[in-house]
Amino acid sequence: LNGVGRPVVVDLADVSFMDSSGLRVLVVARNALDERGAEMVIADINDQLRRLFEISGLTSAFTFEP
């Protein structure tokens, strides 16, 4: 978390379920990275999880990559 210019990639390829506590962990981590000038990228997210981010209003808070 030192903001060396490389994004932290969170690969969700093997995640089939996430609830609000999982979202909270990602938000807290993203905020910590933001404070250090680093970026978080969510990678390989399935349609069900993408919908969870949409319903929660968090799609604009994260960067998503295939």
Image (cartoon, helix red, strand yellow):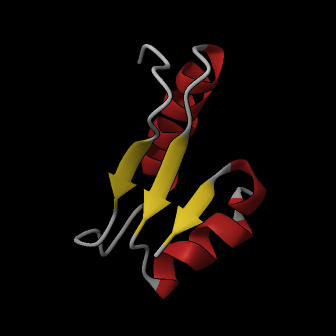
From the top left corner, tell me how far across and down residue 10 is, in percent: 37, 51
Determine whether, in the image, residue 43 is placed left or right of residue 14: right
Determine whether, in the image, residue 61 is placed left or right of residue 49: right
Determine whether, in the image, residue 32 is placed left or right of residue 35: left
Q: Which residue is depicted at the point 47% across and 57% down?
A: 42
Q: Residue furthest left?
A: 14
What count of labels does the image hold? 0
Q: Which residue is depicted at the point 43% across and 81% down?
A: 46
User: Which corner quadrant holds the N terminus?
Assistant: top left
Determine whether, in the image, residue 37 is placed left or right of residue 21: right
Whether residue 12 is situated above or below residue 10 in the rendered picture: below
Whether residue 47 is situated above or below residue 13 in the rendered picture: below
Whether residue 47 is situated above or below residue 53 in the rendered picture: below
Quick one: 65 or 52, which is closer to the camera? Answer: 65
The picture quadrant where one finds residue 35 is: top right
Q: Residue furthest bottom?
A: 47
From the top left corner, tell me how far across and down residue 43 is, in percent: 42, 64
Q: Which residue is depicted at the point 63% across and 65% down?
A: 53
From the top left corner, tell me how far across and down residue 27 is, in percent: 57, 38
Q: Which residue is depicted at the point 46% across and 44% down?
A: 21
Whether residue 6 is situated above or below residue 12 in the rendered picture: above
